[in-house]
Image (tube, rainbow, N blue to C red):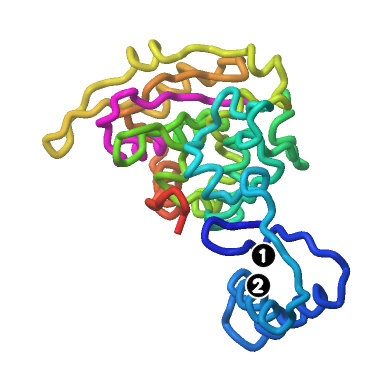
Amino acid sequence: MWDTVCYNAGFIMLRPTPLAQQLYLILRNMTSTTRLDDQQALNRALKRLKAQNPTFSMKVLNKHSFVSGRAYFEVGGRLLPKPNNCDPSKTANCPIVVHNNWIVSKSAKIYRFREHLMWLYDGDNRYYSNATRSYLTYRNSNDTSVSTESQIAALKTALAFGHLLRRVVILPTFICSNGARRCPLNSLIRIRLLDTSFKDRFRESSFLRHPKVPDAVKRSQYDGAAALRRASTVSKASNNTRLTISSRRLLQLFAKVSSSVLNVGSLVGLQVVFDDKSDGYMLEQKLQKSIRRASYRQY
């Protein structure tokens, strides 16, 4: 498989020939005696084998049917899933294999596949199919000039809401740092670190579109945005005006909501003031440790 800039070691088809076995003997020797990774070693081994053996035959798999993560997600303009993304009449839009590479960490790879509805594994915790789990959704501004910092602050507030209300946060889409288009969360922060402290406490923006999420969950929604805004108060700190809501008031508003999905609208500029200072401090420590800025590829 061609990986945009070189041959890909992660998806390769070989016939059981002596030269194919020799290729992997060379690879094993290179990776055990040098600091080369498997992809670097593969490309060097192929070059050496072709030079030594004129009968060695290889070819690149069809570049439209077998595509790298960079080619499919980035070059293809698919930072977020698109409706009707694959037109059967156009082979270029219907790859057989998408290699989930050009992104760093297992957590980020799984998150991206989930975001694109390309992940079906439900797991022991029934990630999708649990019919009794409670969720919380919020939205980001449509204003393309909104700052990354304000979006991250809203994410922290959403996670605080989820913590207090014992609801899993379903993420919105985000505005890219250049304001040109909407992006997934991995364009803003490092997914692996967020997973460290909040694993299973958040879901990708496309979660409610997944076929394994029960229809009863998708239908059971409560709109609390207006009530939240009415209950929020204006406060001033360091000459900055902001909206706040106490944890006690938040629980009074929504703790007894029985709907599967609670919608709270925009959280930009809103902060939670914890009545239990110890609980608030522990959550803030987790947020500081687990939220770090990152680029789309998570380097």
Q: Position of residue 82 (x, y in %)?
A: 54, 28
Residue 262 located left or right of residue 244: right
Is residue 122 located in the magenta-colored stretch of the structure? Answer: no
Q: What residue type is labelled 1?
A: Ala
Q: Where is residue 161 in the image (x, y as percent from the top left)?
A: 46, 30
Quarter the N terminus occupies: bottom right
> Foreground residue, 71 or 110?
71
Q: In the structure shown, which secondary structural element does the residue marked by tag 1 occupy?
A: loop
> Foreground residue, 112 or 129?
112
Residue stretch rendered in magenta on the structure: 134-156
Do the CB atoms of the residues marked 1 and 2 lie less than 8 Å apart?
A: yes
In this view, 288 is above or below 168: below
Residue 294 located left or right of residue 256: left
Q: Where is residue 175 in the image (x, y as percent from the top left)?
A: 36, 34
Can residue 275 be spotted in the picture?
A: no
Question: Residue extending furthest front?
Answer: 54
Residue 9 numbered mark, or none: 1
At x 70% / y 31%, what residue is drawn? 128
Label 1 Cα neighbours within 10 Å, binned few <14 / some 14-19 / many ≥20: some
- The Cα atoms of the two marked residues, 1 and 2, are separated by 6 Å
Q: Where is residue 140 in the image (x, y as percent from the top left)?
A: 38, 27
At x 56% / y 43%, what residue is drawn? 72
Is residue 136 located in the magenta-colored stretch of the structure? Answer: yes
Residue 9 located left or right of residue 263: right
At x 73% / y 27%, what residue is drawn? 212
Quarter the C terminus occupies: bottom left
Q: Which amino acid does label 2 sit on?
A: Leu
Residue 42 numbered mark, or none: 2
